[in-house]
Image: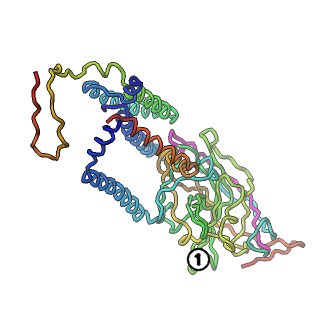
Amino acid sequence: MHSTLVRAQNVFGFLTTVAFFVAGLVALSSLLYPADVNVDVIGTNNVKIAKGRAHQYYTSKVQEYAVLYFDLEADLSSLFNWNTKQVFAYVSATYPGSKYTDNEIVIWDTILPSRSASKLILKNERAKYSINDITGKFAGRDNVTLSFHWNVQPHVGRLTWGAVGLTKGVKFPGVERPGGKKEAAK
Amino acid sequence: MDALGLSKLRHLKPRQLLSQVLNFALILSTAFMLWKGLSVATDSPSPIVVVLSGSMEPAFQRGDLLFLWNRNLELDSPPTPGTRVGEIVVYNVIGKDIPIVHRVVRKHQGPKTPLHLLTKGDNNHADDTELYARGRWYLDREKEVIGSVVGYVPFVGYVTIMLSEHPWMKTALLGIMGLLVIVQRE
Amino acid sequence: MDQIQSIIDGFIDFEGQRLAETLTTAILVLAGVLAFIVGYVLSDLKYTVYIGLSGTVIAFLVVVPPWGIYKRNPLTYLPASGVQVQMVDGDADGGKEKEGKKVK
């Protein structure tokens, strides 16, 4: 500590140690706030299958899209504490298939920046993202379940995920053709 | 002035110099061992990355530090194997240098196919299909993804961004250190 | 020029160094503890960051410049008595020191 330079180095060094400890304690404090998320309502309202080519660059084949509306009521306020930077909430659809047995796609998401926005009440919300499958076929798919997830982003520390609210398996209708005849694909 | 220069040269002891070089080499190799050890534990070639773009805002800003884990995150109970949608992954597109940090929005897995993932930045409107290699519409989890984000520290990585984007800063830093050595009367 | 040099060097005496060391530890630990507690109680990380930063600035301002309080116990050297000593060459000689000739 005998010269200005040595003192400055010492202060800086000790500062990083203290900052490291405080940040570590802040990150650990997140454990004191367990998640307690309630989902009151989640369900698919209305599903239609349409054929089309919506902004796809990967193939010129016609894809089958599901047009889906859902309800959701959830209270995520328990996820917000002093170490929460934002909560990313999303609804995903999970379904089995033949070539790809395990599929999951996000159909809707939102960013909740603070506790004041943490109560979600969605009625007849339209799915935000186009719902089509890697094989291009969606009509008549069975056992499609919707689930609601959240991802807590802290100011410092570990990211956490959670999921709740699984709906029963829903069978998607076949493609609607003019004249009312429904046709199911594999 | 001349006497000062000569007396300093006399005090330059080769053994002491070599011992200092050895000390420095020890520090460097310890740092390298820690890095490689972390790499093995997380099974990721680059277990700590710095956020370079704003495509995941407001969650991640440029200069934030991310800790990766490349083994399964096991988000549910019972844990579902493989990466889930909603996880934030870091991937290297084959042929391009810069790693990209985005969220998984789609997942398709079959018994005979690799795990296909589609990603999208929270702050981007469109998904990442345009960023992938030519002719590829999905990411291969095994080959292209180097890890999933589990931990987060803000700001700390900004120094590396500044040094790499403003190379004059490296020169300035060396200049200041040199100046301090000259000005110091030790 | 000399004054600027002495400020840049910032040499302080031993009691001053001890004081500087104590102050560094005290200010930074206090800032850290306060930052955490205030932020936790008020449930807002902003306070933690601000208190931490202020503590850092205070620590730098108090400890780094060579203030007068650090120079209150200067070393007292014996008065010069006209002794002339020949320059010793490094420390590799191992004992063979040449004694100076005393000149009255």
Residue C4 highlighted magenta (yes or no): no
Quarter assignment of residue A119:
top right
Residue B26 vs residue B148, the one in the foreground? B26
Q: Which residues are magenta?
A: A62-83
User: Is B95 on the left or on the right of A23, as rendered?
Assistant: right
Residue A45 in picture, x, y percent from top left: 73, 59
Pick the front one: A85 or B24: B24
* Location of residue C59 with respect to B43 vertically, above or below: above
Identify the residue position indicated by label 1 in the image: B110
* Viewer-proximal residue among A99 and B63: B63
Question: What chain does mark 1 sit on?
Answer: B
Q: The N terminus of chain B lies in which quarter of the figure?
A: top left
- Res. B93 image quadrant: bottom right
Q: Amino acid at mark 1?
A: Gly
Q: Residues within 10 Å of mark 1 (few under 14, many from 20)?
A: some
| Residue A126 relative to residue B84: left or right | right
Residue ranking furthest to the bottom: B112
Q: How many marks?
A: 1
Residue drawn at (54%, 72%) of the image: B143
Whether A79 is among the magenta residues is yes
Q: How is the image coloured?
A: rainbow
Check disc 1 and report its element: helix, strand or loop: loop
Q: Which quadrant holds the C terminus of chain B?
A: top left
Q: Is residue C75 above or below residue A7?
A: above
Q: Is residue A145 visible?
A: no
Front-most of C102 and B93?
A: C102
Q: Position of residue C35 (x, y in %)?
A: 44, 32
- Provide residue B94's location: percent of width, then percent of height: 60, 70
Q: Residue at x 81, y 74 (%)?
A: A182
Task: Decide if residue C53 is in sight here.
Answer: yes
